[in-house]
Amino acid sequence: MHFKKPQEILLLGPGPSPVHSRILEAMGQHTLGHLDPEFLDLMNQTTELLRYVFETENRITFPVSGTGSAGMEAALVNMLEPGEKAVVGVNGVFGQRMSDVASRCGAEVVEVEAPWGRPVEPEILEQALKKHPDVKLVGLVHAETSTGVLQPLDSLVEIIHNCGALVLVDAVTSLGGIPVEVDRRELDIVYSGNQKCLGAPPGLAPITFGDRALKYFGERKNKVQSWYLDLSFLIRYWGEERLYHHTAPVNMIYALYEALSIIKEEGLKDRFARHLLHSSALVNGLKGLGVETVVPEEYRLPSLTSVSIPDGIDDAEVRHRLRHEHLIEIGGGLGPFKGKVWRIGLMGNGSQRGNVERLLKSLAVTLNSLGHSCSSAEAISEADKVYR
Amino acid sequence: MHFKKPQEILLLGPGPSPVHSRILEAMGQHTLGHLDPEFLDLMNQTTELLRYVFETENRITFPVSGTGSAGMEAALVNMLEPGEKAVVGVNGVFGQRMSDVASRCGAEVVEVEAPWGRPVEPEILEQALKKHPDVKLVGLVHAETSTGVLQPLDSLVEIIHNCGALVLVDAVTSLGGIPVEVDRRELDIVYSGNQKCLGAPPGLAPITFGDRALKYFGERKNKVQSWYLDLSFLIRYWGEERLYHHTAPVNMIYALYEALSIIKEEGLKDRFARHLLHSSALVNGLKGLGVETVVPEEYRLPSLTSVSIPDGIDDAEVRHRLRHEHLIEIGGGLGPFKGKVWRIGLMGNGSQRGNVERLLKSLAVTLNSLGHSCSSAEAISEADKVYR
């Protein structure tokens, strides 16, 4: 049976984000061989654009052939060896996942916790590092997709640098929407995913390794436990040697190239400002509907807003109606937030005034029909205050 | 800079194979959420079609979110634990890779070897299993992409069944072009790749696990070393629970669905016959050019033909001219075959009479221009004998 064209759903959940038609068109072009000269040239251009988006001059910057979680795994399996010690900041699903992946590398993992909806505090990290001065690596989630918390990095990174450990950052829901600044912050390993603020379809995980990380990698005593993600091979394919490792997902790289080109055309500064603007309008509009956000303003992600589901309102019913009656996807809560929180993403091409207004109106209709009285006009008027 | 449409290169190398326009079109459709009801429905249809192509009723049949080598790694990390013993058939790059991946799982690996260009012999395997009766798993490469050898499976599988070990088969370059017959052969774990006989762009690795494999999996003592490829999570996302694990590569799954639909429409039997027909015509035509094949007929892959580069002919120069003057890609040799062998794939949509003739003519022009005298007309006439 022929593939049935999917409906165009407005993706305002925690990712994937709406994909620009230019990117979809690029992805549907003829497949080239993974060692074809024209494709190798595109690989070079793609890594150059990735350096721009990561704000780094790191030579080893490329997309891992898997989704964001493969990027996390690539970072950890290459940097950790059995018996080594890692500290991981845990304040949501993705910090927890990082801890799990690190322990599967045979590392001893020390979790530094914060409540869901709050960032990891510098004092807690400092205490942990004092207690464990032999830590090799500290992993932090820059943008916790399960809660909508933006982790302030500078103070934590300073503490980590002072103790000499490597800094590993999960930038899955920040890269391309919020400043990551790999070089300015001297982050050692940073990975992301295609399908959030970069605005491409899911399937690749951009990653970058700094010199200090590579030095540690060169001193490894054991083979990397993953053949597929072994950096020594990946460097030789993405670098000048072009030595075959695995068959690169060619058309996904077309898509990533085009997504990065769009970012370069817009410019990072304008793109960050756009994400901030529409997220502020969304938060104002939600207040106009009587819906409260979960994360205090200073830690709130511009790419993802988590909101408390109003009392008496059925989580699944609202998301079902938004999806089927208004063709909008928003996300439900995970773990302790399940049934209590919605996650609304304004990422990449999704971060637009028209989308904010469409969501507010649709949500107003839906909430009213379920007995939560609210005014669409008031919500729009609140949002408009930000745009004035 | 806008993505520059790539040239349409006729992909007659060891993969990727030419992608049908229907598949490219499917891939460029709007991205749905990875938990969207419409997408979940497509996932079900895709796994149903995968069962058809694998010829299995295995419940646990799905595409791994990575390329073929991720499929290999998924098979091995889930089935092997540290200290367990595996036998791997090695007669080319991919058997060697399987051995490497298995040893990175902490397994003790016994390699059963055959020369490049020849299959693994039953007697050698039998001896190895007698010497190592405690083997948990035997890994075999059904279609060795580095040499063009088709491994006869039935006699080997019988030997393995008799000793009670699991049978793991790499069907990367066979699935969809050559009978794999998972259920009839009682193969326990089989994986493949999108970009060969299935005819989709690279990026996914279909895999299937039988009941015996799942039973062993359920008895594991250790966590799977890869979080990304941990079957216990993947089962819960691809199965009825639909529990979020990682964000599936949505558009790649559109492409796979459409590729599988095309296979179902053609029918496996006709598709296998087509691969055999055009490969026979190619081999005949090559003889007409005075170019010899590497693998004896009984072990020759219908999807990939390896040929000896004629004396005095420069490998790279021929491939360069084919690519730039005739817009055709063929593959070079790997390892001991480097500079000595070309690999010509007729896979999926690439396996067509017009492609055989275009390649023979282009190769004749190229070889003549480099001083290897040969007749294009004679090659076509030899190929035609097969089509009569």
Image (cartoon, coloured by chain):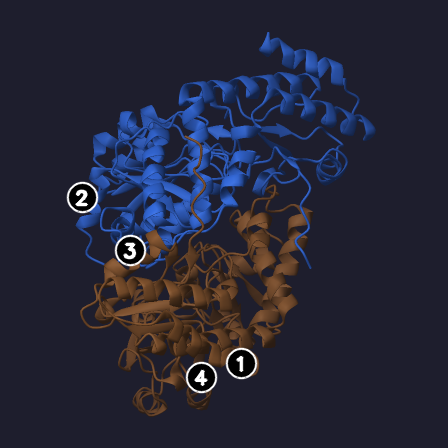
Chain colours: A blue, B brown
Mark 1 — residue? B388
Mark 2 — residue? A215
Label 2 vs label 4: CA separation?
Answer: 45 Å
Residue type marked 2 = Lys
Chain name for mark 1: B
Chain name for mark 2: A
Label 1 and label 4 in one chain? yes
Q: Is residue B177 left or right of residue A127?
A: right
Mark 4 — residue? B153
Count of picture labels = 4
Badge 1 or badge 4: first in the primary sequence: 4
How packed mark 4 is, by other alpha carbons closer than 10 Å (few <14, some 14-19, many 20 or more), is some
Badge 4 or badge 3: first in the primary sequence: 4
Chain name for mark 4: B
Label 1 vs label 4: CA separation?
Answer: 31 Å
Q: Which of marks 3 and 2 is in front?
A: 3
Q: Which of A154 and A175 is in front in this view?
A: A175
Label 2 vs label 1: CA separation?
Answer: 63 Å
Label 4 vs label 3: CA separation?
Answer: 37 Å
Q: Where is residue B265 in the image (x, y as percent from the top left)?
A: 65, 66
Q: Which of marks 2 and 1 is in front?
A: 1
For the point 48% across and 49% down, the residue is A30
Label 3 vs label 1: CA separation?
Answer: 33 Å
Residue A352, compared with residue A92, is above or below; it is above
Chain name for mark 3: B
Residue type marked 4 = Leu
For the point 32% across and 42% down, the residue is A41
Label 3 and label 2 in one chain? no
Q: What element carries label 3?
A: helix
User: Would you say the residues marked 2 and 4 are in contact, meaning their CB atoms lie under 8 Å apart?
Assistant: no
Residue type marked 3 = His
